[in-house]
Image (cartoon, rainbow, N blue to C red):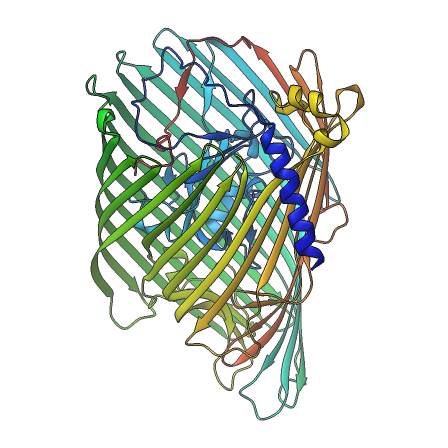
Amino acid sequence: MKSLFLTVGLLTTAVLFAQENPKTAVAPQAKDSIPTPKTNELSEITIYGNKRQYIKVDSDKTTIDVKNNAMLNSGSSMDAVKKLPGVITSPTGSLTLNGKAVAIYIDGAPSTLSGTDLQNYLSTLPAGAIEKVELIYNPGAAFDANSSGSVINIVTSTKRLKGINASFNINYNFNKYQKPSPQILMNGKEKNLSWQTMIGYNYIDGEQRSRNKQVFTTFPTYESLDQKRLSLNTWRNFYFRSGLNYKLSQKSNLLFNYNFNLGNNRETFDASTIGTGTQAAGINYFNQGVTKEKSNNHEISLQYKTKLDTLGRTLDVTAFSNFFDKNPISGANAADSYNNANVDLNLTNYYLKYDFAFPFEKYQFSINTGGKFNNIEVEDNGIYSSGTATAINSNTIDFDYKERNLAFYAEARKKIKKFNFTLGLRYENFHIDRNASTTATPIKYTNSNLFPTVSALYEFNENMNLSASYSRKISQPNYFVLDPNTSSAPDQYNNSKGNPFLKPTFFDNYEVKLSAFQFVQLGANYTVAKDNNMFLFDANPGELRSITTFQQFDKFKTMSAFLSFPIPIDYFTKGKDEFQKRMADMDKMNYVFININYIKSLTEGYNFSFKAQPIWNYSAQSQLILPWGIKNSMSYFILPQGGTWEIYKIQKPIQQFDISFNKDFMNKNLKIGLHCFDVFNQNEVNALVSSTNIETQFYQKQDSRNFRVSLTYNFGNLKLDKENTDINTEKVKQGGSLLK
């Protein structure tokens, strides 16, 4: 009841705040940019004024400014994404948005990487390279059907100023391991050519502690293993990003981008396994090892954009290639045995897409259509050796994966009085070849499906609207969950592998959302996933060995609700008049932004030892303007105990509190920040995982408490110019319709 009264009180406060919010001014269009035709999209909403748009709420997405947010832009892209409203990280590192699965897009294109490869990439991509992040809750037909539920689009592009300018940034971490991470960004524009170059180096060290207490339930007597592991991880990453934009005419632009990442990671670990029970009593196993992984990732894109006529019809053609390879080499030694693994993975991706936009402004109607061809090939070969000095066993696992995807879509938008309707249909054809040495025969199949999307929005008035949407999506199992190779050397008590027999997962997504007073959002989602696959611990009957893999479930149903609203501190502390003055400049505002999520899931086709309970997630972000021009930012989230996250029962609250102080010098050309992340060192995972033959008490604690000093210095031509030109490969249209 107290929570109910608190929520009502905060909403009342938000309404008072919203009533004072002035209308957003429209920024002038850059002269060198291609004019965007008017369509029947809903007008965008700007939170906290119009000078600097930190948060924008549209009918189908929310845009978060990362570049100018000190709490978000000093760490990695992964750190920034985890702090976004409605984003929750699972115990295994996967992401959800308002209770739905997430597909990660980089500059409007879906990331080819998956699993830990994607997590490592985001962990090494600095948040300082991000301009903004778009949270797309229910993507339409223009998005890949393989987007499963929601989309998080990370936009790394920035505006180029006339002349040449640059920015130098360095982050220095102070914890047990002190490492610097410098970065320099240079960009400019001269006549019809604009360009950008970003060069940086990340050097990050950190510890991770884990403990698995496992009870094997198929034995007639009590048998358990208590496994502990301490890992020291070192990530060294060099990155280079470059873009060119050439203005062919007043109506056409040609864009070229090249991104390169070079990684050199290392993990050293000490592990122990202690057995308890009739058969496990004699197990007293200690293991030491190291894993070295070198990787490189190349991304090349060429994009042509043009306005076809005076009616506003546009054409967008993009060609993209991605080349990724990694070579993890691991070795572990116990008193009487050793385990070695040498894995070589290569990924190649090519795609070509086109998009047409046909606006009919007179009739308040528009049609978008397009198509795509995508080809992905993965080769992963692993060599595994284990045994003793006198007996050596060798095993080779080869895995080949080929995917060809052909897609076409059409999407229509129509406005009728206070109603906005969107109807879309997407056709996708997948041809899959999986060939693993662990399977008797290659696995080949073709599936062709239609994926409808429909949404409607009703505008009660300029301050309130109600929307509802439905979409059907698919999740093709990616190479990470299919690959039978492991990323580290196994031992006789642990093994990790993919499952090449997984089938596609089909999703039916339903959403309803109320947006009020330009910033308050209250909504609910319902998702049914058929043949959903999830990561879990398992064991073969009669074996004292844990196997971590992916298994398929008949149905996975998720119901979630979300609420977000701000608390205007200035309205109560500074008075109405001063509050209205600060509304035009986010830099001078004092506020707290609250997010609440409720998630309840139900798994069919699998029995757990515990009953699924709903889970709550609370988060808050604040900004306070202190004396002497010091800006204070704070962030807090908590995942309380007792709830069930997918198949994990949370045994202890997962929470983190961050704080930062930032000060501008030299007419804002020099920015210095002091940050502390996980101030109370409370971000750890304690969960119960139940499967058919094993129960696991899962514990994981990273070295998350970290002190950081950040410095940014801007130099060169820093004056705004109306001849700014965007250099990017952004494939997201206004209103959130992705050209993919």
**Residue 675 shows up from this direction:** no
| Front one among 41 and 501 | 41
738 relative to 453, above or below = above
Q: How many marks?
A: 0
- Please identify the quadrant where the N terminus is shown: bottom right
Residue 264: horizontal and vertical position, in percent? Answer: 53, 42
141 relative to 85 in the view: left or right: left
Residue 284: horizontal and vertical position, in percent? Answer: 68, 77
568 relative to 162, above or below = below
| Front one among 639 and 329 | 639
- Please identify the quadrant where the C terminus is shown: top left
Q: Quadrant of residue 70?
A: top right
| Front one among 85 and 718 | 85
Residue 449: horizontal and vertical position, in percent? Answer: 22, 56
Q: Quadrant of residue 34?
A: top left
| Residue that extends furthest to the right in the rendered view of this protein | 627
Q: Residue sitting at 34 percent across and 9 percent down?
A: 192
Q: Residue sitting at 54 percent across and 51 percent down?
A: 562
